[in-house]
Image: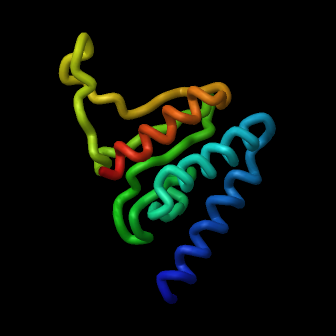
Amino acid sequence: MTVVAKDDKNLKQVLDKIEGMDEPARAVMRRMHDLIIAAAPELKPRIWYGMPGYAKSASSPVLVFFRNDERMSLGVSEKATLKPSGGKDGLLIPAAWYLDGLDDATERRVAEIVRAAIE
């Protein structure tokens, strides 16, 4: 199978996973997918632990992912570029964020997180 065909197959699986979610999560997760791809067009989606994940290639480690379990969340894997937040958080490294929806400020922050994860 060619890389393009594999990328297309993986994308379809991710989109199918999102479409199988119940509303209102489906709309939020559709938008989350679009935000991740817009922030880092070089990332390739694929299913990772049953949910959408994004990596630099079909065979490289997932860097960014989102989940829709009891709550929706965005996360970065241990393979992403991780930096301590500093300040009062000291050496803690933010790696996951829960969300109930998306507004302009949250969308901007998602894009920042995605871009930082792939540096």
Which residue is farthest right? Answer: 23
Picture quadrant where residue 11 is located: bottom right
Q: Residue at x 62, y 59 (%)?
A: 14
Picture coordinates of residue 96 (x, y %)?
43, 32
Picture coordinates of residue 98 (x, y %)?
53, 27
Which residue is farthest top? Answer: 88
Q: Residue at x 51, y 37 (%)?
A: 110
Does 90 sit above or below residue 95? Answer: above
| In the displayed structure image, the side of residue 83 where residue 108 appears, left or right | right
Picture coordinates of residue 54 (x, y %)?
47, 56
Label tally? 0
Q: Residue at x 78, y 41 (%)?
A: 22
Which residue is farthest left? Answer: 91
Q: Residue at x 27, y 25 (%)?
A: 85
Picture coordinates of residue 62 (x, y %)?
40, 56
| In the displayed structure image, the side of residue 57 where residue 48 appears, left or right | right
Which residue is farthest bottom? Answer: 1
The image's colour scheme reads: rainbow
Picture quadrant where residue 116 is located: top left
